[in-house]
Image: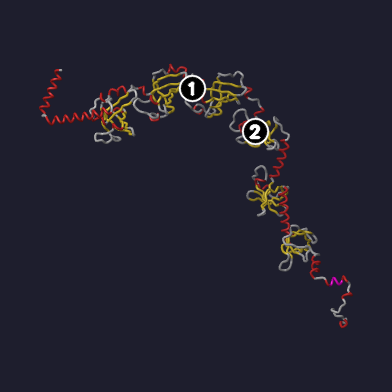
Amino acid sequence: MDYKNVQPLADFNWDELDNKAQKAVKAEPTQLDNAYDQTFNQLTEQDVINGVIVSISDREAVVNIGFKSDGVIPASELRYNPEFKAGDEIKVFVESKEDANGQILLSHKKARILESWERVNQAFENQEIITGYVKSRTKGGLIVNVFENIEAFLPGSQIDVKPIRDYDVFVNKNMEFKVVKINQDYKNVVVSHKALIEDEIEAQKAEIISHLEKGQVLEGTVKNITSYGVFIDLGGVDGLIHITDLSWGRISHPEEIVHLDEKINVVILDFDESKRRIALGLKQLTPHPWDALDANIKEGDHIKGKVVVIADYGAFVEVVPGVEGLIHVSEMSWSQHLRSAQDFLQKDQEVECVVLTLDREARKMSLGIKQLMPDPWLSIAEKYPVGSKHTATVRNFTNFGIFVELEEGVDGLIHISDLSWSKKIKHPAEFTKIGDKIEVIVLEVDAENRRLSLGHKQLEENPWDVYETLFTVGSVHKGTITAMNDKGATVTLPYGVEGFAPMRHLEKEDKSKARMDETLDFKVIEFSKENKKIIVSHTRVNSEITAADLGKSEDGEKKERAAKKNNVKKLNDTLEKTTLGDLFGDLNAKLDQADDK
């Protein structure tokens, strides 16, 4: 080529070029690059895209993803499917656009995991039924592989509606599940096979209940026995026989009537379609025992039965199976003393009773056992006449007296004022205690109102008849102060009798006051047999006031004390002025005059 005849580019005639060619030559480089790039797929890291296998080797597989360059994935990620070959389409996860060697890093395994996780979430949201493979057993349940790449946990309680003891029988089996829980943070999945069974059972229940009618008799199998009743399987739906609907008679436990897995006929008493609850009955299939009760039984008859229930207020006696009567505690004894039924009867005890009331329509019967014995109050006046003495048992205390029992059914009251002649008793507990024996005398009998008035102090003579002769007004006795208050002191006198000394009568000769536990001489200044009261004074012991003067006023007493002081003074003056001989002479003269008179 002759380069000498080549025309310089600057001198080239651009106008001669074709317009299209001219535009192509002058096109900017960026526009050319964009046009070139549009011929390839856009690529973003962390995305899942489709790719085509270009080639597979022992170490890696080359995948065309429609980018400038091909990507590579480890060959181990394709070994789960030995059928993969060049030209097959697969999903890949873009880990990086290029590594140190400028290659695109892809992952088929991560793409599968992300796809499986998305499918798990969809199954959870839509409550889909999925299939999984039970890989192994673990603590508390099983490990299940779902969607090929997700390991889910199947709790033991979610395997079946019945308790499962051996989990190993489910390993290496395919089963259907529902996804019941997903933890997005920890990528944990919980599945349940029990939920599928429950859904199926609920559908069966709805179908069965829709055809039920009250009074319908069905055959069922005893599924479970509890203390409160029996669960019956009616063929896909359960019903409950309450313990009270098993038998007309009283039973302690349902096992007395039915046994596990036993087939029995039951009647439908009630059902709740919305709550799937069915109430069943067994005793309703047999006639009511009250309908078969002997028609000859009437009020006043004596019948026998067994105590089936005991409460504080009474006892239920089963006359025939299913027919019971109540013995109220008040019909167990003629005694008015309050007691419980346990004091008279025991459970399972055979007893004879008297029919008090009988209502066949209401199916009620009241019984009594005290009627088997004569009423002690009918002959109370003959057995416990006024003035008779007896031994009684202390049963109860009140503020006003003691209730005692003379015999079963015969109680009496000892008033607190009839306990002692001499002691002042504030409460009966100071005198005796419950359960003690006490001697009593009958003071009054009221047979109509079933009341006995009793006394204890009347067993002895009234000591105040004797005290009246011993503690005469003006007499002086030794006494000990045993109690004191603002008004005065209680003084214990001989024979244990108590007197009272007002505060002004506790002044001693030296003007000091008598003290607690001090023993002094006391003069009786007042005695009342009717009120059982003795008033004493220590202050007056040293005075010369006579008994006849004790009724005078305080002013009179002061004047007498002053007069006595004057007489004593005159006596002293006389002693100073005269001799003893004069005194004795005057005294002898007065004595002679007295003799003459």
- In this rendering, is residue 16 above or below 442? below
> Label 2: which residue?
241
Q: Quadrant of residue 491?
A: top left
- Left or right placement of residue 333 versus residue 11 in this view: left
The three-letter amino acid code for the residue at tag 2 is Ile
Q: Nearer the viewer, residue 326 or 488?
A: 488
Q: Quadrant of residue 217?
A: top right
Q: Nearer the viewer, residue 287 or 185?
A: 185
Element carrying mark 1:
loop
Residue segment shown in magenta? 21-25
Query: What main secondary structure does the magenta stretch of the protein show?
Result: helix
Going from the N terminus, do you reach mark 1 or mark 2 first? Answer: 2
| Quadrant of the snapshot with the N terminus | bottom right
Mark 2, Cα crowd under 10 Å, few <14 / some 14-19 / many 20+, is many
Q: Position of residue 562 (x, y in %)?
A: 22, 30
Q: Are marks 1 and 2 in contact (CB under 8 Å)?
A: no
The nearer-to-camera label among 1 and 2 is 1
Q: Nearer the viewer, residue 56 or 401?
A: 401
Q: Is residue 24 magenta?
A: yes
Q: Position of residue 33 (x, y in %)?
A: 79, 68
- In this rendering, is residue 226 above or below 401? below
The three-letter amino acid code for the residue at tag 1 is Trp
Q: Position of residue 541 (x, y in %)?
A: 25, 30
Q: Position of residue 497 (x, y in %)?
A: 31, 27
Q: Nearer the viewer, residue 69 or 477?
A: 477
From this viewpoint, is residue 281 visible?
yes
From this viewpoint, is residue 265 visible?
no
Query: Mark number for residue 334?
Result: 1
Q: Is residue 149 magenta?
A: no
